[in-house]
Amino acid sequence: MKNIIIALRVAIVTLILTGIIYPLAVTGIAQVIFPDKANGSMIKNEKGETVGSKLIAQAFSKPSYFQPRPSAAGNGYDASSSGGSNLGPSSQKLRERIKTDTERLIKENPDAKGPVPVELVMASASGLDPHISTEAAMWQIPRIAKSRNADPEMIKKIIENTTEGRDLFIFGEPRVNVLRLNMALDKKFGKA
């Protein structure tokens, strides 16, 4: 009986330390040091309303907006169901989806030059990557310029102004956050 009481005390102390005190301490420190990140890296519009997170992609289907990578998360862009499709290169379902997406993108972007950028038809591992390459953004310029009746050079400038560089100047590739890019379009040309 004595051993059971000692074991219960140790279990209760461990539970309080690791299940309550430690998480509260880490959350408190994060709120003080990195409040933006601790609260989901939310993006707010000019009115101060939250429009999304800079970490999670959103669907944009209007021709006047840049489109993100496809999503395999849940029913698409579902942050509560992050994950890839787990379809491999030999999957007929994946090949059919890529073919369908490629045909759709070519139809929606008839004036785009060159082949469809690969990330516009391939989902990321999480299914929620909010970024596309600058090349994928540039490929979509003719459609957006036509839809917004804007000079393509102005849209190119917006892409250049919203491009994020490599992390620590060496990791990754330059990229564009699609939500921020579309917000910059709305700011310059008005909501579409």
Image (cartoon, rainbow, N blue to C red):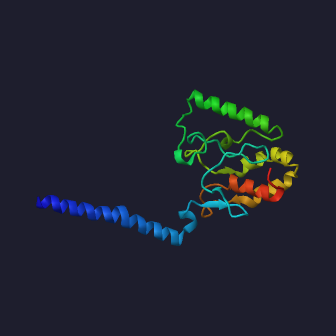
Against 31, is 181 above or below? Answer: above
Residue 39 visible at all: yes
Q: Is residue 55 left or right of residue 23?
A: right
In the rendered image, residue 107, in percent from the top left (x then y), is placed at 78, 34
In the rendered image, residue 74, in percent from the top left (x then y), is placed at 55, 40
Quarter of the image that includes the N terminus: bottom left
Q: Which quarter of the figure has residue 187? A: bottom right
Residue 177 visible at all: no
In the rendered image, residue 122, in percent from the top left (x then y), is placed at 63, 40
Q: Nearer the viewer, residue 20 or 173?
A: 20
Farthest bottom residue in view: 32
Farthest left residue in view: 1
Q: Which quarter of the figure has residue 159? A: bottom right
Residue drawn at x 74%, y 48% is 66
Number of marks in the rendered image? 0
In the rendered image, residue 52, in percent from the top left (x then y), is placed at 64, 55
Farthest top residue in view: 92
Q: Nearer the viewer, residue 112 or 128?
A: 128
Residue drawn at x 78%, y 37% is 108
Q: Is residue 86 left or right of residue 16?
A: right
